[in-house]
């Protein structure tokens, strides 16, 4: 059976504040630890009023401090937004504070819009240097060499597992060439999944960190006691993606009884395509869907996103999913 983990954007529902969202996420992480989830990752997004995970390393520390055994990490740090040395120092510090529990997933996208990318002082060309910057980050985590001028303190000599995140073949190729585990964003970029897996697995070169390919795939999952209630809860996810498609950042909307009139046929088609790998319904329905997905992809691990409006319904969905495992 594949391992089961959680990807959290720290959703901010309408009527709530980022403070509320952060404490809701801590409550979920503590529950996930009891239910046996393997890891809990925070996503880096900027200028999104509906997501409170912008200071990703800080939120990772908050979650790690409030739990005791579950692995906690970034899913991910958008590396071109940050100097590799600073990332090594931040996650080296986290590893010192919570040894053996910290993961570092790395992406090359901005995690935001073009205007905010400029506000981040992000150089668009740095995305082309992503493979070299991952290697630079590995260098800072390695044991210091004699006469090494610049060291990450903390960071040097610490075992912080590095992952490469991706939504296409580029990330897959980088992960394969560096011998790193690969996390694919199939929860919103399903069309490139098959090719990315082929690129990663066929091109994988063993490394000191990893002897064989290891794949974690993102999926959206909403489970409730009835099919109708699960589908209603899922309308918040659909509305969130409508807002993304429209370029209209908003807090997470409440669920609705009917999506008719909320999206155009074109928007419906686009959102539905982005959410192809969404498994919604009763536990039995979701289990059948996930079994088929795992059979198709041979994933080693699933990382589940449930961007649900009601924190109690989000907890219930993850609890029911854990029961399946």
Image (cartoon, rainbow, N blue to C red):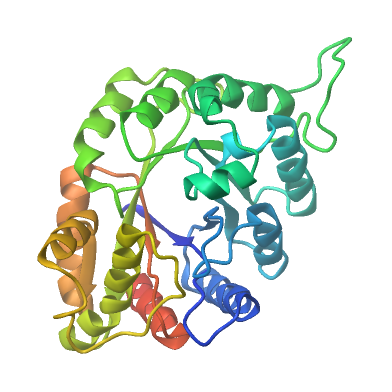
**Location of residue 324 with respect to 180 vertically, above or below:** below
For the question of whether residue 161 can be seen, the reply is no
Q: Nearer the viewer, residue 273 or 92?
A: 273
Residue at image position (48%, 29%) is 180
The N terminus appears in which quarter of the rendering?
Answer: bottom left
How many labels were placed on the picture?
A: 0
Q: Quadrant of the C terminus?
A: bottom left
- In the displayed structure, does residue 244 sit left or right of residue 283? right
Q: Which residue appears at 45% of the width and 35% of the height? A: 181
Residue 160's x, y, as percent?
65, 38
Whether residue 14 sits left or right of residue 132 in the image: it is left
Q: Residue furthest left?
A: 265
Which residue is painted at 55% across and 59% down in the image?
Answer: 47
Q: Nearer the viewer, residue 19 or 262?
A: 262
Which quadrant would residue 314 be assigned to in this image?
Answer: bottom left
Q: Position of residue 319 (x, y in %)?
A: 40, 78
Q: Position of residue 192 (x, y in %)?
A: 23, 38
Determine whether, in the image, residue 31 is placed left or right of residue 61.
left
Which quadrant of the figure has residue 187? bottom left
Q: Residue at x 31, y 35 (%)?
A: 168
Q: Closest to the observer: 75 or 324?
A: 75
Where residue 100 appears, x then y in whole percent? 67, 48
């Amino acid at each position: 059976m594949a391992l089961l983990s959680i990807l959290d954007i720290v959703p901010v529902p309408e009527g709530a504040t980022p403070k509320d969202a952060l404490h809701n996420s801590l409550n979920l992480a503590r529950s996930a630890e009891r239910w046996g989830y393997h890891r809990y990752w925070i996503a880096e997004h900027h200028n999104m009023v509906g997501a409170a995970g912008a200071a990703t390393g800080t939120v990772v520390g908050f979650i790690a401090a409030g739990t005791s055994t579950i692995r906690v990490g970034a899913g991910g740090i958008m590396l071109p937004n940050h100097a590799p040395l600073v990332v090594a120092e931040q996650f080296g510090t986290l590893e010192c504070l919570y040894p053996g529990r910290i993961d570092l997933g790395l992406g090359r996208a901005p995690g935001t819009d073009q205007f905010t990318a400029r506000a981040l002082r992000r150089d668009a060309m740095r995305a082309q240097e992503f493979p070299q910057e991952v290697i630079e980050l590995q260098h800072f985590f390695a044991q210091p060499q004699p006469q090494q001028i610049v060291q990450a303190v903390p960071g040097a000599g610490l075992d912080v597992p590095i992952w490469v995140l991706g939504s296409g073949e580029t990330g897959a190729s980088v992960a394969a060439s560096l011998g790193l585990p690969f996390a694919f964003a199939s929860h919103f970029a399903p069309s490139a999944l098959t090719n990315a897996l082929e690129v990663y697995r066929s091109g994988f070169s063993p490394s000191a960190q990893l002897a064989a390919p290891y794949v974690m795939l993102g999926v959206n999952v909403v489970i409730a006691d009835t099919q109708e209630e699960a589908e209603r809860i899922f309308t918040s996810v659909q509305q969130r993606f409508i807002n993304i498609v429209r370029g209209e950042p908003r807090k997470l909307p409440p669920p609705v009884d009917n999506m008719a009139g909320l999206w155009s046929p074109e928007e419906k088609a686009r959102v539905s395509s982005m959410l192809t790998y969404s498994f919604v319904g009763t536990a039995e329905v979701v289990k059948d869907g996930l079994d088929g997905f795992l059979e198709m992809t041979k994933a080693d691990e699933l990382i589940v996103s449930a961007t649900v409006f009601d924190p109690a319904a989000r907890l219930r969905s993850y609890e029911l999913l854990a029961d399946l495992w």
